[in-house]
Image (tube, rainbow, N blue to C red):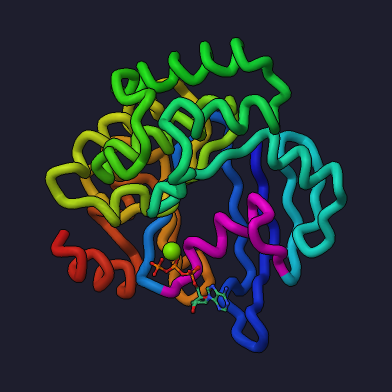
Amino acid sequence: MLSIKNLHMKYGNNEVLKGIDLNVKSGEKIIIMGTSGSGKSTLLRCINHLEKASDGEMIFDGRHISLNNWKKDDIQYIRLNTSMVFQNYNLFAHKTALENITEGLIHVRNKSKKEAIEIAEAYLEKTGMLEWKNSYPSMMSGGQQQRVGIARALALKPKIIMFDEPTSALDPELVGDVLNVMRQVAEDGITMLVVTHEVAFAKDVADRIAILDKGVILEIGSPDEILKNPKNEKTQRFFSMLNY
Ligand SMILES: Nc1ncnc2c1ncn2[C@@H]1O[C@H](COP(=O)(O)OP(=O)(O)OP(=O)(O)O)[C@@H](O)[C@H]1O
Ligand SMILES: [Mg+2]
């Protein structure tokens, strides 16, 4: 459902993605790992047009997109069909949990207010946050804010959902709840691209794990291949750094 070819990304003279090729099947869960600065966030950001790549092609759901030359309706299509969960939740501080979700449904998806509220409540229920629907982000823990962030991303019914280190800003005791919600999302069959260093989660949920290093995919394969039997020495070093 997603095929990326020869993705390059430069910030000035600094080439941070050096020819990424990645094919993702419908329903597939791909976990992306790699050291800080290897280009994980940039990769996700180039897919959903938060950044414009310097070169590369993408076929998303049958639609051919030049990653360095986005057309207006490509951007619109990607907005409508992908959503992203961020490390720092990115909730609107002056909106309640419910309003954080209805906002996009009303203004991007053209839902009526009534319908938007119904959808928002259903997803808050799903992430265990319904009783917090009238709370503002400052009244919630990081884990709770992130569960609202996930509800918001799911409510848009994307064809693919991307997570960029969704638990790395959380206190350790809050990580489990968020990962459990993500496991549930995975079971629903949606296509997922997840940047995370939670190895146990990756082992259970990933169809494939991709290791990014200095802007290239060093290695990609099943959790068994990558975790038990990494071929590349740098992958081995990376996991020993994670104490795995
Ligand atoms: N807006 C920007 N302007 C210039 N350089 C950037 C920008 N964003 C990222 N970079 C550089 O691009 C490289 C890749 O960054 P990226 O954020 O994609 O890495 P990452 O793998 O997500 O790292 P982390 O694990 O720390 O989140 C880094 O060298 C970074 O300094
Ligand atoms: Mg990052």
> Which residue sits at x=67%, y=70%?
8
Within the image, what quadrant is residue 236 found in?
Answer: bottom left
Asked if residue 52 lies in the magenta stretch, the reply is yes
Judged from this view, the residue extending furthest toward the front is 94
Q: Which residues are magenta?
A: 37-53
Q: Say if 137 sits above or below 71 in the image.
A: above
Where residue 201 sits in the image (x, y, percent)? 26, 42
Residue 177 placement, left or right of 39 = left
Whether residue 157 is visible here, answered yes or no, is: yes
Residue 109 placement, left or right of 159 = right
Within the image, what quadrant is residue 60 found in?
Answer: top right
Where residue 205 sits in the image (x, y, percent)? 33, 36
Residue 197 placement, left or right of 112 = left
Asked if residue 242 lies in the magenta stretch, the reply is no
Q: Quadrant of the N terminus?
A: top right
Q: Nearer the viewer, residue 195 or 178?
A: 178
Whether residue 85 is visible here, answered yes or no, is: no
Within the image, what quadrant is residue 52 found in?
Answer: bottom right
> Which residue sits at x=67%, y=47%?
3
